[in-house]
Image (cartoon, helix red, strand yellow):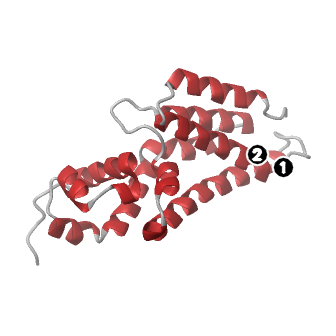
Amino acid sequence: MGRPRGFDTDEALEHAMRVFWGQDYEGASLTDLTHAMGITRTSMYAAFGNKEDLSRKALERYTEGPASYGARALQEPTARQVAAAFLDGSVRATTRPGCPTGCLGVQGALATGDPGSDARDALSAWCNEHTSLLRDRFRQAVDEGDLPSDADPELLARYLMTVANGIAVQAAGGTARDDLQQVADMALRSWPPA
């Protein structure tokens, strides 16, 4: 049996998530990561694997933490409430005080080039998965009569994700939370009636 770890892996992963969130996959050097995590490269590799493995674990942590609004939104009783909770959550998550602005998944997918293609593909798959979950929830809403029978669940999900991704990009560019909330509110005005 090996020596017990001399650091808190949960805390180290939190710090790594923030580095990837603020600097994206390619911008986050191993030095940046290990310095923020307070560990050596050897300890990082032993606990988390390589940089790509660490980035996947950081994305999982982001999904369960700052981006958990997505899963909660899906539980709302109406499609409109799902959309409102999703957009409101996007505004709050991308403008959290004390955290990087924007979205780890969106910024990472946009800023990662060919050398980080595996990480970029994982981030794109993450975004697409959330679109699929929204689509399935809106299909349910059509089946239940909560959305009109001619509503297009795929298009509604893509619309919502596009607005949320735009909010993330604008947040990363410094747009204020109140201004982004106005965008979210405006997007909801075009939501189809039940």
Height in image: 122 above or below 162? Answer: below
Q: Name the spot of residue 83 as percent of width and height, x first.
A: 68, 37
To which residue does mark 1 refer? 152
To which residue does mark 2 refer? 156
Residue 79's tag is none
Q: Please name the residue shown 37% across and 61% down the image.
A: 55
Q: Name the spot of residue 33 as percent of width and height, x first.
A: 25, 56
Q: Please name the residue shown 56% across and 45% down the image.
A: 70
**Quadrant of the rendering where the C terminus is positioned:** top right
Q: Nearer the viewer, residue 1 or 87?
A: 87
**Residue 182, located in which quarter of the rendered image?**
top right
In the image, taking residue 109 as reference, residue 128 lies left or right, namely right
Q: Please name the residue shown 37% across and 68% down the image.
A: 52
**Quadrant of the rendering where the N terminus is positioned:** bottom left
In the image, taking residue 26 as reference, residue 63 lies left or right, namely right
Callout 2 secondary element:
helix
In the image, taking residue 142 as reference, residue 76 lies left or right, namely left
Q: Nearer the viewer, residue 143 or 59?
A: 59
Mark 1 and mark 2 residues within 8 Å of each other at the beta carbon: yes
Do we see residue 86 in this rendering? Answer: yes
User: In this view, which residue lies farthest toward the right?
Assistant: 150
Q: Name the spot of residue 71 as percent of width and height, x first.
A: 56, 47
Identity, as a three-letter code, of the amino acid under mark 1: Asp
Q: Name the spot of residue 144 as percent of width and height, x first.
A: 82, 45
Q: Nearer the viewer, residue 189 or 33?
A: 33
Height in image: 140 above or below 170? Answer: below
